[in-house]
Image (tube, grey):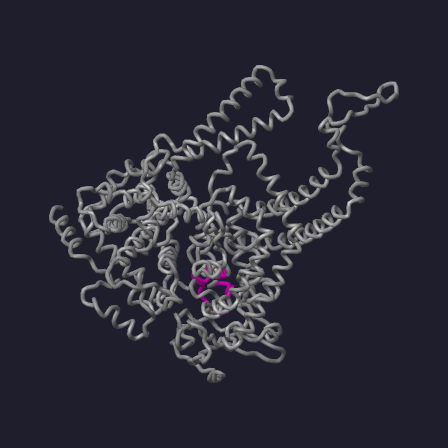
């Protein structure tokens, strides 16, 4: 059944200084609505030959249209008439730039590419570093291909291994066998003979032609990037007033603030007069937000159950590249440009046809990967050999080190979180995660490792002693290989032997990990000591050897994942992009989760009860929307969130103040900071932010005289949060901190101040200090919100709330406990309330 056509375009009165932002609302009655008001952009002057007009953007409002054909929770996304003139008209329009705005920064057509270049230019430290990186990448490719060809065709290995004698020309001119030392020139063939070997092999010629074609393509791309890098350098120097030599000393927040200020002068985006921090993040992270949402909703087929191995996660750089090629920027992708989803993907009527088309694209891409598999596999093996062989020889235990997996980076990433923010956060969590993973030991493996290490170490000690006594032992065949293998066996065996002073405290270590990674499944709570939890953690925090093995297997596995596993998800992927894409004026089509909209994507069990209308399908998993909103508000303190998000932040502030009033004073928690941080640090006492984190985690265990209840950790975190004077969430207009007074208490709950430890003696810039405290504050919020979520799950009748009508959700957050519950819907047990009352009377 067809859908009635939209009504004619009509005007929408919003006042003199406001301009609407459109948003698609999936639900039982799909519709567009105005989400927020932005300052009205100024008139843009356009002319054609013989015509002068004063053109203002128009508002497109489409009435509600209910789809008669829906699939589960998916609903139709109606198309909308373009706000801007068609491309044919835009090519004929001439933009009149006021006098004084004669630079090329006015009306930039591809703001996604422009803002991304600005961000990467800052993160990669300027023009010289970026160009050198590109040039050396070309040199590395040329070196690998040339050196590999030389090793295959230009070396006489029988001579090098002394399997046959070498004929040297004697001074008298006669030829006689010489069994002396073999030199490298003796094993290298002359150039004519080497060239003849290359010409005789058709496979080598084919591979060289393919490598040369790819190298020329990369060369052209580097030359194009050269012009782009120089343009961005000019933009930094002239528009942002940041010289190249000062780029390393400027934070991204400062660059972002200057971009927002420059928009008011030069109108880089003509659809909006004012840019916000969220607009810039949407431009830079448009596609990454989609991938984060797809991982969060378990839409990508990356989990598999294999015999003997159990459940494994497989997501590699090669598979990620193919997904981006398929969805975002490849031929036949879902996006017709970098900022606009193709119109047919916004309509539910063609979903089956589009799913078949996407399935064919996946099949063709999988077959292409299968054809290129030998080439890519050879390159992966060669690159891994040249990259890791020397490291393995020098540090055999390096393969036993861990790293955050690619799946873990998507699973743990907030919406609208930039790369450097994610990298810094996961780097802070590296040591706690390593301690947690190393705290698990197997008694059987420990006994085996001790004995294997003893025998291998004994043989290694004897061989080392012999080489010290007489270095000719090194000339014995395979003696160096034996030494290397024995050293590797000893290193691997030691990795299975627990530390002599290891303390078994998995729950506290996992809490410390959570403070930095901000996400963990609900069933980890209270089960940190179980092997299943460690195995799931290993999927996020994998061995480096596993990472290398997965990348080597990627050319073989990726084609089959595209052809079989991903094709089965084609219809779900089509519905995902239709239901979770919204169009924002001046930004384009973005993932709706990236709007941080509590109303449409909040979870009732993550402090959003009574403020969200989202169904189970529309809710983000693991509190992703709520935690992402808090993270973005802390890292961008000048950002003004939408009304629903502001209400959520205000309620979170109230809840923190309530719990802080029931917790021990913050100065008592911070008084033992060196002791607690020493438990979590290898180097002893840590910095002031780490002291805050340590006591939010360890205070419930240290306060052994308090009645034990689930709210102790949340109360400790709330107490420290309420005492942070550098809070960027609870105090949005707080002054910048002085180096001499990093933190003071402004809490009026207890009437006294907190005296934290002395700040680090290393001179820090103000932005670095604020960044560290913002990171600590977000970590405390993560612990606090997870504790409250755990309490909410333990309450009777705490099943997930289905989507409510808008009026009902706004008027009655809970029918059963509407009088007793605070804004967030938490209910304290009677025993916990009495215990807290007794503690307050004692104090």
Q: Which image quarter: residue 732?
A: bottom left
* Residue placed most toward the observer, 80 or 552: 552
* Residue placed most toward the observer, 493 or 783: 493
Q: Within the magenta stretch, is there residue 283?
A: yes
Residue 841 image point, x, y percent: 11, 49
Residue 475 image point, x, y percent: 65, 21
The residue at the point 60 percent across, 65 percent down is 361
Residue 814 image point, x, y percent: 24, 68
Residue 307 image point, x, y percent: 49, 50
* Residue placed most toward the observer, 773 or 385: 385
Name above or below for residue 750 compared with residue 293: above
Q: Which image quarter: residue 434?
A: top left
In the image as oriented, which residue stretches furthest toward the front?
Answer: 307
Confirm whether residue 56 shows in the render: no
Q: How many marks?
A: 0
Magenta span of residues? 265-286
Confirm whether residue 586 shows in the render: yes
Query: Left of 507 or right of it: where is 369?
Result: right
Query: Left of 720 or right of it: where is 179?
Result: right
In the image as oriented, which residue stretches furthest toward the top?
Answer: 469
Q: Within the magenta stretch, is there residue 324?
A: no
In the image as oriented, which residue stretches furthest toward the right?
Answer: 173
Name above or below for residue 582 compared with residue 171: below
């Amino acid at each position: 059944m067809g859908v009635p056509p939209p009504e004619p375009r009509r005007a929408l009165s919003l006042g003199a200084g406001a301009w609407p932002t459109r948003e698609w609302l999936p639900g039982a009655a799909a519709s567009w609505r105005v989400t927020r008001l932005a300052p009205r952009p100024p008139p843009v002057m356009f002319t054609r030959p013989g015509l002068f007009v004063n053109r203002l953007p128009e508002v497109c409002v489409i009435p509600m249209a209910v789809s008669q054909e829906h699939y589960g929770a998916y609903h139709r996304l109606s198309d909308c008439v373009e706000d801007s003139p068609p491309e044919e008209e835009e090519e004929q329009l001439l933009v009149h730039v006021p006098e004084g705005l004669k630079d090329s920064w006015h009306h930039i057509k591809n703001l996604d590419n422009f803002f991304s270049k600005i961000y990467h230019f800052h993160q990669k430290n300027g023009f010289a570093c970026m160009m050198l990186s590109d040039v050396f990448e070309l040199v590395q490719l040329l070196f690998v291909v040339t050196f590999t060809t030389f090793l295959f065709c230009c070396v006489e290995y029988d001579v090098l291994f002394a399997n046959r004698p070498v004929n040297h020309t004697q001074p008298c001119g006669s030829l006689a066998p010489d069994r002396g030392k073999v030199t490298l020139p003796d094993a290298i063939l002359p150039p004519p003979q080497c060239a003849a070997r290359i010409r005789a092999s058709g496979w080598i010629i084919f591979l060289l032609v393919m490598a040369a074609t790819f190298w020329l393509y990369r060369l052209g791309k580097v030359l194009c990037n050269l012009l782009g890098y120089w343009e961005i350098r000019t933009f930094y120097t002239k528009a942002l007033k940041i010289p190249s030599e000062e780029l390393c000393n400027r934070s991204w927040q400062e660059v972002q603030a200057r971009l927002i200020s420059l928009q008011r002068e030069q109108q880089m985006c003509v659809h909006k007069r004012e840019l916000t921090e969220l607009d810039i993040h949407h431009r830079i992270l448009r596609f990454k937000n989609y991938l984060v949402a797809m991982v969060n909703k378990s839409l990508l087929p990356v989990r598999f159950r294999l015999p003997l191995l159990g459940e494994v996660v497989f997501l590699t750089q090669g598979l990620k590249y193919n997904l981006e090629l398929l969805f975002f920027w490849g031929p036949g992708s879902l996006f017709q440009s970098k900022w606009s989803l193709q119109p047919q993907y916004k309509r539910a009527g063609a979903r089956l046809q589009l799913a078949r088309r996407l399935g064919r694209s996946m099949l063709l891409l999988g077959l292409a990967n299968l054809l290129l598999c030998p080439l890519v596999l050879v390159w992966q093996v060669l690159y891994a050999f040249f990259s890791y062989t020397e490291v393995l020889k020098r540090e055999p235990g390096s393969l036993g080190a861990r790293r955050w997996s690619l799946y873990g980076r998507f699973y743990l990433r907030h919406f609208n979180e930039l790369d450097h923010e994610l990298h810094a956060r996961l780097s802070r969590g590296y040591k706690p995660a390593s301690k947690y993973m190393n705290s698990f030991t197997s008694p059987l493996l420990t006994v085996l490792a001790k004995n294997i290490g003893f025998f291998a170490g004994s043989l290694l000690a004897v061989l080392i002693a012999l080489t010290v006594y007489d270095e000719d032992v090194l000339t014995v065949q395979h003696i160096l290989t034996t030494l290397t293998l024995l050293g590797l066996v000893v290193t691997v065996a030691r990795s299975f032997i627990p530390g002599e002073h290891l303390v078994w405290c998995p729950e506290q270590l996992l809490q410390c990990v959570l403070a930095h990674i901000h996400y963990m499944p609900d069933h980890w709570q209270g089960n940190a000591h179980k092997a299943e939890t460690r195995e799931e953690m290993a999927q996020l925090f994998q061995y480096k050897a596993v990472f290398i093995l997965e990348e080597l297997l990627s050319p073989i596995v990726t084609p089959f994942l595209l052809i079989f596993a991903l094709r089965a998800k084609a219809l779900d992927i089509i519905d995902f992009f239709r239901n979770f894409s919204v169009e924002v004026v001046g930004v384009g089509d973005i993932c709706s989760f990236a709007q941080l909209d509590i109303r449409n994507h909040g979870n009732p069990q993550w402090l959003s009860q009574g403020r969200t209308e989202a169904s189970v399908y529309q809710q983000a998993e693991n509190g992703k929307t709520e935690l992402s909103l808090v993270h973005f508000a802390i890292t961008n303190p000048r950002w003004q969130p939408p009304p629903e998000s502001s209400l959520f932040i205000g309620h979170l502030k109230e809840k923190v103040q309530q719990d802080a009033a029931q917790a021990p004073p913050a100065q008592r928690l911070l008084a033992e900071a060196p002791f607690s941080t020493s438990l979590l640090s290898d180097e002893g006492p840590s910095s002031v932010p780490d002291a805050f984190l340590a006591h939010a985690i360890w205070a419930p265990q240290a306060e052994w005289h308090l009645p034990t209840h689930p709210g102790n950790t949340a109360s400790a975190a709330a107490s420290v949060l309420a005492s942070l004077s550098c809070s960027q969430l609870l105090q949005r207009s707080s002054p910048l901190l002085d180096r001499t007074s990093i933190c003071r208490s402004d809490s009026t709950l207890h009437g006294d101040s907190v005296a934290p430890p002395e700040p680090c003696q290393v001179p820090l810039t103000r932005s670095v200090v604020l960044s560290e405290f913002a990171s600590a504050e977000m970590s405390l919020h993560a612990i606090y919100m997870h504790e409250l979520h755990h309490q909410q799950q333990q309450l009777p009748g705490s099943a997930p709330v289905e989507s409510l009508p808008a009026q009902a959700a706004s008027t009655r957050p809970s029918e059963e406990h509407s009088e007793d519950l605070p804004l967030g819907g938490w209910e304290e047990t009677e025993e916990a309330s009495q215990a807290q009352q007794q503690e307050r009377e004692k104090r």
